[in-house]
Image (cartoon, coloured by chain):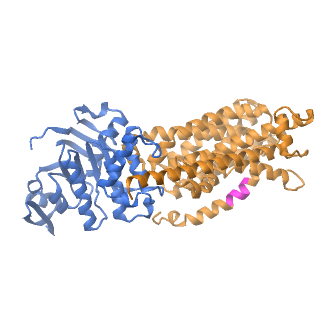
Chain colours: A blue, B orange
Amino acid sequence: MTAPAFLTAQGLGVTLAGRVVLNDISLSLASGHLVALVGPNGAGKTTLLRALAGLVPSDGAIHVGGDVLSSLSLRERARRFAYLAQGHVVHWPLPARDIVALGRYPHGATDPARLTPRDSEAVLRAMQVADVMAFSERRVTELSGGERSRVALARVFAVEAPVILADEPTSSLDPRHQIDVMKSLRTAADKGTLVLAVTHDLGLAARFADRVLVLSDGRLVSQGAPAEALSEQVMAEVFRISAYRAEYQSHAVIVPWAEI
Amino acid sequence: MNAQNVTVAADVAAHRRAGVIGALVVLVALLALISLGIGPVRLSPLTVIDALFGGGSDVQQVIVREIRLPRTILGCAIGAILGLSGAALQGLLRNPLASPSLFGAPQSAAFGAVLVIALGLADVRSYALPVAAILAAFVSVFVLLAIAGRNAGLLILILAGLAISSLAGAATALVMNLSSNPFVVLEIAFWLLGSLEDRSFRHVVLALPFIVVGAIILFQQRNAFRALSLGEETAQSLGVDVDRLRLLVITGVALGVGGAVAVSGTIGFIGLVAPHLMRPLIGHDPARLLVPSALTGAALLLAADIAVRIIPSTSDIKVGVLTSIIGVPFFLYLIMRERRALSGGVA
């Protein structure tokens, strides 16, 4: 893994309401990789994602595509990071197409009824990739959980950003839809996007990710290819569980098994 | 569904919205004509149009252009800014029960105006009045949003709004209570009721600049409201400066509502009702609701102001009283509809 780093952090720290949430995190992530960010509840995974996107103030240096993050305007940041928040919240019953079109907001296309040809092509591409064409006119509030997660993904793809930050993209989905979502993210990575996805599912992380980052108590305690990052020792110390380990179709298989 | 069908469906929706807006413009124009024709001397719409453009008798011209036109202009502008403020607050807070009057903004603005008069700082035709009203409205909405915090639920917003409007009402009552001058007490009573009677162009000049600036500020935020549909965090990740947006919306609402209250007193519930009437026709997109809600607000206030002149009664019914009498049951109906969200269930 000698690909040049696209997103780096040095000595990243975040303090929220007087509590140190992240402490001295240094990482270096390359384009074209799907990176899974794992760790116990409260380890600071979501905060790390937000800090990398510049959504919470942080100490230390973050570089993206060679630029210092804090030197970029809000709009420039929005073009580099497509951010998928937890839960796929949509507050109004808008048609799926309008939600996906919001992905073009950072590019100046703030009105879904007046997209430039370039923007509407990006929206269509994203809807095709995420497979939401069949219900593009339906209101998102009427869609099933699986369909809604695909709309959320399409919105993220429509940004066409070099980095996708996804916070638990597979939570509350059935196994089939979990695999769907991870496959879409995998495809985006294979096309050159850097994807950083928070997940609690170590099995999915091992199956789909190129690299795994393990966060514990606000510190990055382990990183590397899935099998090494999630070594028996890390599983014991960080997650306090043992796991069934194997290999299947040249991917690591990790199944959480028993508490220690 | 293929790519072409997606575009066609979007076009159909756009045509429908344009049709609704066109119909609303016609409705507002008709109501304005009726409003100009109604009063002790009844004039037909044709006579009104004639007098408006310099025809008819001198008496008709004076009645239409000098006596009734200011009232109609204010009805239009105040109704529109109240409808727009309601739609903007609902967009900002992603909350169908948000509105200036439920947040205590008009009540606070009235307190600001009343205080200035009671202290003898200004008469009813000075710019000190709208400025005090605007400042008080700004403080009330700012405090409300600060108390509620980010991502506040329906219940917190409504409780905080209730507290603030009660406080503003109590403060106004205190000023009334302490005032020894019976004229001041009469003035205060006027602000509590809300009316468009006997307004002159002096009042239009007093209120309109603030209303127009407030409306421009709110309308410019329209697309940010749409991005906010995805929550504050996602909106921020799309490049929306959420803190700045909040401040701008508070400023726009304060300018508009403060300016309106300074000449009309408190007229409630138009901001709550207007967006709700439009959602079945326009859809839920908070950006597209702004203009139709403003037009609906204008139509509602013009209609209410016509109604108070038609309804037979021994003394004048104030238009603010009428909008509250219609608005509060509507609010109760909305509470019933939002019961699940209010009682903590999944919205």
The quadrant where residue A172 appears: bottom left
Residue B324 magenta-highlighted: yes
* The N terminus of chain B, quarter of image: bottom left
Q: Residue B2, relative to residue B215: is it above or below?
A: below
- Please name the residue shown 49% across and 46% down the image: B225
Q: Is residue A195 visible?
A: yes
The quadrant where residue A18 appears: top left
Q: Residue furthest bottom?
A: A258
Residue B217, how many percent across, how many down? Answer: 56, 36
The foreground one among A101 and A83 is: A101
Residue A57, how many percent across, how many down? Answer: 33, 39
Q: Give the number of callouts.
A: 0
The foreground one among B143 and A100 is: A100
Residue A228, how many percent across, how many down? Answer: 8, 54
- Please name the residue shown 51% across and 67% down the image: B340
Q: Is residue B107 visible?
A: no
Q: Residue furthest front?
A: B4
> Which segment is the magenta one?
B323-328
Q: Is residue A212 left or right of residue B44?
A: left
Residue B147, how many percent across, how many down? Answer: 51, 48
Residue B120 magenta-highlighted: no
Q: Main secondary structure of the magenta part?
A: helix
Q: Is residue B282 left or right of residue B7?
A: right
- Please name the residue shown 43% across and 55% down the image: B5
